[in-house]
Image (cartoon, rainbow, N blue to C red):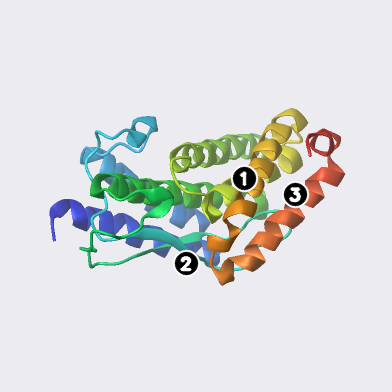
Amino acid sequence: MHHHDEEAMLLIQMNNHATWLIQFGHYTEAYYQLRRTMELEEMNGRSFGSDYCGHRVEVLVRVGRATLSSVAHTVDGTMFSSPLVITFDTTTPTRKDISYPMGIRTNDSANLQRQHTVCATALYNMGLACHLRLQRHSLSSSQQRHLQRTVQVFYQQALDICQTLPLSILQLAICNNLLQLTMVEQEDWDVGCFWYNIFCRLLDQGDLTFATMTGSSEGLWKHFLQVKAYYSTTNPYAAGAA
């Protein structure tokens, strides 16, 4: 296995271990574990900022398809509280007629898609760890404001990256939690309406692609529809947008 492959495997493994930490309430440990791994990748020449979406970056994942496979536990209320797990296949497909999502067939495009999946998922889990700490620990007002800004930055970075991916649980989970953050915790209805519109647009796209989602996603899909209904009735801005 190449050195870059080993580093890619490390990020995937650290992401999946962080989901376990989040499950058991070790939010700070999960956050710093992912942060250290991401910083290591940056030191080795792979940026995870906005430039990471460019085609000039080195291939990060060469271990077959890296896809969102499962949530670690059930969601609660109007928040999507589940950390996301990445699965990977250590055998690289060799058939030429493999049908990649969105009709992508070239190795470079498929590798780029896997890069974005891994990176965006790790950023989402970092944001979620901070978000759950914000909700479930007593913090001062200044600490709350700082953590809210941190959560928003991670979610938005993850969403920027995964816009290149086919619709998945990841995009919906991010918008779901940005709704929770802006409407419920910050009570910023204008910003909340912006995220509500994006959330509804993703759900509309999901109606067209739902047949391609796995059976295990059906319960999650119902959660997202319930969230949409909740915000359409509790927020007058969202009700007008719906």
> Residue 164 sits in which quadrant?
top left
| CA separation in Å, label 1 and label 3 | 11 Å
Q: Nearer the viewer, residue 229 or 84?
A: 229
Label number found at residue 20: 2
| CA separation in Å, label 2 and label 3 | 28 Å
Q: Residue at x 35, y 48 (%)?
A: 104
The reply to whether callout 1 and callout 3 are in contact (CB within 8 Å) is no
Q: Which residue is mark 3?
A: 228
Residue most extreme to the left: 2
Is any atom of residue 27 visible in this view?
yes
Observer-side mark, 2 or 3, equals 3
The reply to whether callout 2 and callout 1 are in contact (CB within 8 Å) is no
- Label 2: state its secondary structure: helix
Residue most extreme to the top: 190
Q: Which residue is mark 1?
A: 202
Closer to the chain start, of discs 2 and 1, is: 2
Q: Quarter of the image containing the C terminus? A: top right
Is any atom of residue 132 visible in this view?
no
- Residue 226 is left or right of residue 219, and the answer is right
Q: Quarter of the image containing the N terminus? A: bottom left
Which x, y percent locates residue 236?
A: 86, 36
- Label 1: state its secondary structure: helix
Q: Amino acid at mark 2?
A: Trp
